[in-house]
Image (tube, coloured by chain):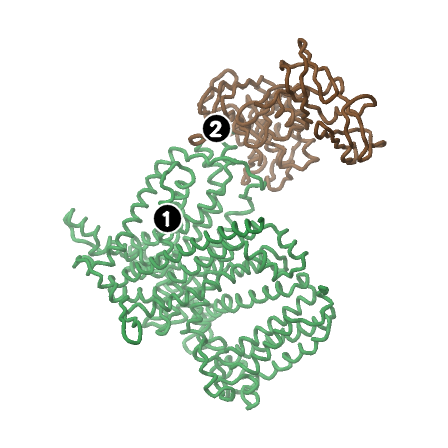
């Protein structure tokens, strides 16, 4: 017999987390060990050595006494084990124990650092402390999780969300990690902008840095140079507009025309997505640089000396528009296809001609898509790091300025923080303006049931320029990719055009020796790191995204809107800002992970999670809620429902999220450039390094290899998606037989 | 106060064929005349070509062959924009980004009316469908029934020569359907509009139409007023599609001028011959015309008895197969297993030719 849950007095999930808490406190090293995935500490003095000791052994040796108050918080939950879930004491004790434990753990972590007290007022309050602590490790991590989930179980026991332990736990977990890895770094960033050179805080320092002429100067209006903020803004607005227009052009050609080779065009527009963005910048140099093909050809033709005209705004603009148009296209194609054909047909039967129909019905209904596409182009351009670095010339933008403030000779964290705040301000304002522009109007078809119908073709006056632009752009893209391929097998571009595989050999040579294969190529290290990090990050990103999407579409809870805002916020935070804020936040205890692979994985998860959330929301809202409800009434709990009903139906969305996060992790540069270390170098930052040394051949060869790796990853995905569909049909036939 | 008037015109199809792609024939050699001021329904199962026919009148599909005339004017190659026709869509196709007022005056904007005249006409249209004062709302703020009326008003204010409805009731709940279809009929009759109406619901078609065009496999199966279709279906397909019919095999024994004598088992019956010849035939008997008689009839046993409130439903079995019958007498019902005699009522059973 199945027992009614509320009457049970054994709580397997609760017992699990209580045990986890004790294990974290008594068995695992409390502080961080050098390598997260290495277990040498087991043999290295554990459990008594102070560096590797669990909390209990530290306390027994009279060390780190501030860990002691967590002990009662671990004991308290034991007392409720025999009680029923409906007993008010059960909920109260769990709430109190979890909240106190988590709060204390956080407070001591933030309060005490490598130099004793972290803040002057703590020292004033409690007197000097001649002890110190480092970043948290396994023990603290597990204990913190235990406290968190004890607390959420207390919340569930109070009856929140129908007493659902899984849902409260998931909400608590998502809130905790988003707070730690999105809000905490941003807060640190804000604070860092106020720090003076001697470590105190000053608003004057902030104001001085903020209103620096190098940021807001308007010299370019009178022939001089403008501040980086204006440069970035101008560039981002241009890129946003151009990518949106071009994306719309391609979407129109694909949906509103009788164009024959739609598949080819589609592939062409998606190609730049699997290309590291700055690779396009490299191709632009090969074409238009000082010794670029077009520049020299044109110079010979007209008889002038070739110039460096492309470095600066023109070059960055061309490269970014090429790189980000596909994103705009992918956003717009959905919206353009989504405009119900009967809307346009209705307009036609109401005596509007094609042009009037397009202007008064089709275009306004595409507004959300246009706004989204613009926002994406704007943010991507703001955050883009590679292209301005490669092509910027004297046109400084915020992202590169931030980079040089951190790694350059000036090493000024405060300035980097101020620049990052300006950057973040721009994107958040754009985010807000977009919402404002869309306003209260509804853009979705009102009734669910659609009629069959066909999209009318574009009005002729529009079709001609649209075709022309699409054709030109497609040709340009083909040339660019031809250049990349060609450039990778040329000795030295513009100087010695003999064909060679030299660059590939330098990067990817291997030697067979007695001990096996030796990866002698210079690129292998960063290549394998990239593969490893991307492979680890992709499933985690997809999982975070889908769980969040599940909570947002399927559950109702107080504060859901701010929850949604919080999880989508990292979407509006440029990668550069993430990079800087992660350095500021995670370079010191309590979470000390800079220079590890972990920080790269984490940054990818929170950078790419919003896409997983969106994909999940899109496909989950297609699944009728009655599916969950029928599963729940059949006795499954919400975790079992999620696993057995929702997940299998979401397979395409999961795979899409997986590939997207994999590809993004492989091509990302803006956040990565701040977070890589000698031990964990990523492919993109390695390539940028080669470019800075003018080693274009190797850089391009490596990029080409990356593009092919990602092509095969995408191909593999499509194979998998195809197979699951066949699998479903087979299962169906089997069931029917 | 402006009024909504009518400029009703006739619609003529002359040997119209529509082929999609290379060889998918959606409408095959259809000829049809819809008189002005009439409400004509295109009725048929899904895929029979009724919606394609409607869309060809609207100008949303172009005929592959043949001619289409609206009010004696050849419109075969005219696109939707240039035809004086408006359409109410199944999904209503209200523009979600425009208010009700903007939706209703949308078509007027392109017809060269002045601003004040536009507002006046749109107001008149809204009041005709009983939605005065709703002009400022967005479609998403209206109920399904109200959205439907906005769609009707939007089409009406253009005073089109022909008004088209594509399954206008399919997104409404059952109770509202009867009400809305009566309203549509009322407006049509008051204004004298020419209306072409597509539905797959035979009851709806019978209720609203002056004339019904039953379509099947891209061609017309029968055209006629509702009563003619119901009482004298052209073939077994129409008999079965318009209201249920029991199809019973019979033997046509003799033909005597317009009347025929048929035999079903031992029972003989006289009825109009409808141009058929002696030999095997099919009788169509409406469930409501199935009678239990005291004297000699078709021997049958009661197989199923269902009480549905307003009436009783019976299933009878016998040598002739199964017959489904209904009776208003709910107080004294027959029992399962009871032997009864089924008589052939004077008017009711009809001979129908087999569908070709």
Which of label 2 and label 1 is nearer to you?
Answer: 2
Q: Work out how far the residue at label 2 is from the one at label 1, CA to CA, in angstroms.
A: 34 Å
Residue positioned 40% across, 74% down in the render: A595
Rendered position, A215 above or below A584: above
Depth check, front residue: A635 or A346: A635
Q: Which mark is residue A451?
A: none
Where residue B312 appears, x then y in whole percent?
78, 32
Q: Are marks 2 and 1 on the same chain?
A: no
Rendered position, A33 above or below A608: below
Check whether the beta carbons of the residues at disc 2 and disc 1 lie within 8 A of each other: no
Chain designation of label 2: B
* Drawing shade for chain B: brown
Q: Name the residue under label 1.
A: A267
Answer left or right for B164 relative to A401: right
Residue positioned 50% across, 48% down in the render: A437
Where residue A278 appears, x then y in whole percent?
32, 59
* Drawing shade for chain A: green
Q: How many other residues sit within 10 Å of disc 2, few (<14), some (14-19) or many (≥20)?
A: some
Chain designation of label 1: A
Rendered position, A440 above or below A651: above
Q: Which mark is residue B25?
A: 2
Q: Quadrant of the N terminus of chain A?
A: bottom right
Q: How many other residues sit within 10 Å of disc 1, few (<14), some (14-19) or many (≥20)?
A: few
Depth check, front residue: B69 or A109: B69
Indicate the secondary structure of the residue bearing disc 2: strand
Residue occupying the far right of the picture: B332
Indicate the secondary structure of the residue bearing disc 1: helix
Rendered position, A98 above or below A329: below
């Amino acid at each position: 017999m199945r027992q009614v849950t509320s009457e049970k007095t054994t709580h397997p999930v609760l017992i699990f987390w209580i045990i986890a808490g004790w294990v974290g406190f008594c068995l695992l090293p409390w502080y961080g060990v050098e390598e997260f995935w290495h277990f040498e500490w087991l043999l290295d003095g554990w459990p008594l050595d102070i560096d590797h000791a669990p909390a209990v052994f530290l306390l027994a040796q009279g060390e780190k006494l501030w860990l002691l108050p967590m002990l009662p918080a671990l004991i308290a939950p034991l007392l409720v084990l025999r009680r029923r879930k409906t007993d008010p004491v059960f909920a109260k004790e769990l709430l109190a124990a979890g909240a106190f434990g988590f709060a204390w753990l956080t407070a001591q972590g933030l309060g005490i650092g490598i130099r004793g007290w972290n803040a002057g007022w703590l020292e004033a309050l409690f007197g000097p402390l001649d002890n110190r602590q480092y970043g948290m490790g396994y023990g603290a991590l597990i204990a913190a999780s235990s406290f968190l989930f004890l607390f959420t179980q207390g919340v569930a026991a109070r009856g929140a969300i129908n007493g659902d332990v899984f849902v409260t736990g998931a909400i608590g977990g998502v809130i905790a990690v988003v707070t730690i890895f999105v809000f905490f770094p941003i807060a640190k960033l804000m604070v860092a902008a106020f720090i003076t050179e001697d470590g105190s805080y000053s608003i004057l320092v902030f104001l001085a840095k903020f209103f620096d002429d190098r940021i807001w100067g308007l010299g370019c209006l009178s022939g001089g140079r403008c501040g980086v903020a204006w440069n970035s803004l101008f560039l981002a607005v241009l890129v946003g507009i151009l990518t949106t227009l071009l994306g719309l052009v391609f979407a129109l050609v694909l949906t509103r025309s009788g164009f024959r080779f739609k598949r080819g065009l589609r592939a062409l527009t998606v190609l730049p997505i699997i290309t590291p963005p700055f690779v396009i910048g490299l191709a632009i140099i090969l074409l238009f640089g000082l010794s670029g093909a077009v520049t020299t050809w044109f110079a010979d033709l007209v008889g002038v000396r070739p110039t460096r005209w492309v470095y600066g705004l023109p070059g960055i603009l061309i490269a970014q528009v090429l790189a980000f148009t596909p994103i705009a296209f992918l956003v717009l194609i959905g919206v353009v296809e989504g405009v119900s054909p009967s809307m346009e047909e209705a307009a036609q039967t109401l005596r509007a001609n094609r042009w009037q129909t397009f202007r008064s019905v089709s275009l306004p209904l595409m507004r959300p898509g246009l706004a989204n596409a613009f926002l994406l182009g704007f943010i991507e351009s703001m955050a883009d790091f590679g292209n301005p670095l490669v092509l910027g010339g004297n046109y400084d933008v915020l992202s590169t300025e931030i980079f040089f403030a951190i790694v350059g000779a000036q090493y000024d964290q405060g300035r980097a923080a101020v620049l990052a705040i300006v950057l973040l301000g721009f994107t958040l304002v754009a985010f807000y303006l977009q919402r404002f522009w869309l306003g209260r109007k509804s853009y979705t078809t009102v009734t669910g049931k659609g009629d069959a119908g066909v999209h009318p073709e574009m009005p002729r006056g529009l079709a001609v320029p649209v075709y022309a632009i699409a054709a030109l752009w497609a040709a340009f893209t083909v040339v660019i990719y031809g250049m990349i391929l060609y450039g990778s097998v040329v000795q030295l571009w513009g100087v010695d055009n003999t064909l060679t595989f030299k660059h590939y050999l330098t990067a990817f040579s291997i030697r067979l020796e007695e001990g096996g294969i030796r990866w002698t190529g210079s690129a292998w290290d960063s290549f394998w790191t990239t593969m490893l990090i991307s492979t680890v990050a992709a499933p985690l990103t997809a999982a975070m995204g889908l769980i969040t999407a599940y909570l947002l579409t399927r559950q109702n809870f107080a504060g859901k809107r701010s929850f949604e805002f919080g999880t989508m916020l990292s979407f509006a935070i440029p990668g550069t800002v993430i990079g800087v804020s992660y350095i500021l936040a995670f370079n010191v205890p309590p979470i000390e992970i800079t220079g590890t692979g972990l920080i790269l994985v984490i940054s990818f998860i929170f950078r790419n999670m919003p896409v997983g959330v969106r994909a999940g929301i899109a496909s989950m809202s297609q699944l009728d809620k009655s599916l969950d409800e029928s599963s729940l009434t059949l006795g499954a709990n919400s975790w079992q429902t999620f696993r057995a009903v929702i997940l299998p139906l979401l397979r395409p969305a999961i795979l899409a999220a997986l590939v997207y996060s994999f590809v993004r992790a492989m091509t990302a540069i803006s956040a990565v450039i701040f977070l890589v270390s000698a031990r964990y170098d990523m492919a993109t930052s390695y390539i940028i390094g080669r470019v800075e040394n003018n080693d274009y051949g190797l850089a391009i060869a490596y990029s080409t290899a990356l593009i092919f790796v990602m092509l095969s990853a995408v191909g593999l995905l499509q194979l998998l998606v195809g197979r699951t569909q066949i699998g479903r049909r087979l299962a169906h036939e089997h069931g029917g037989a | 106060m402006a009024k909504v008037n009518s400029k009703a015109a006739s619609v003529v199809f002359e040997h119209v064929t529509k082929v999609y792609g290379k060889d998918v024939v959606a409408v095959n050699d259809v000829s049809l005349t819809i008189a002005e001021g009439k409400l004509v329904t295109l009725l048929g199962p899904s895929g029979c070509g009724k919606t394609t026919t409607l869309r060809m009148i609207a100008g949303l599909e172009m005929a592959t062959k043949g001619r289409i005339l609206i009010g004696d004017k050849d419109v075969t190659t005219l696109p939707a924009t240039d035809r004086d026709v408006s359409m109410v869509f199944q999904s209503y196709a209200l523009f979600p980004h425009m208010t009700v007022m903007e939706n209703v005056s949308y078509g007027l904007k392109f017809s060269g009316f002045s601003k004040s005249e536009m507002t006046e006409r749109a107001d008149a249209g809204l009041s005709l469908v009983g939605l005065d004062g709703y002009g400022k709302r967005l479609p998403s703020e209206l109920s399904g029934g109200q959205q439907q009326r906005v769609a009707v008003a939007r089409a009406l204010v253009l005073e089109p020569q022909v008004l088209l409805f594509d399954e206008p009731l399919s997104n409404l709940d059952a109770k509202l359907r009867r009400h809305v279809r009566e309203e549509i009929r009322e407006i049509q009759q008051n204004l004298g509009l020419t209306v072409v109406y597509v539905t797959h619901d035979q009851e709806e078609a019978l209720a609203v139409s002056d004339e019904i065009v039953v379509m099947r496999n891209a061609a017309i199966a029968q055209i006629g007023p509702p009563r003619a279709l119901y009482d004298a279906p052209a073939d077994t397909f129409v008999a079965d599609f318009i209201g249920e019919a029991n199809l019973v095999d019979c033997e046509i024994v003799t033909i005597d001028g317009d009347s025929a004598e048929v035999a079903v088992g031992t029972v003989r019956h006289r009825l109009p011959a409808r141009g058929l010849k002696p030999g095997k035939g099919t009788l169509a008997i409406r469930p409501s015309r199935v009678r239990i008689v005291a004297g000699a009839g078709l021997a049958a046993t009661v197989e199923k008895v269902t009480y549905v409130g307003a009436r009783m439903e019976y299933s009878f079995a016998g040598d002739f197969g199964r017959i489904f019958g209904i009776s208003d007498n709910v107080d004294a019902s027959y029992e399962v297993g009871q032997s009864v005699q089924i008589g052939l009522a004077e008017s009711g059973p009809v001979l129908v030719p087999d569908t070709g």
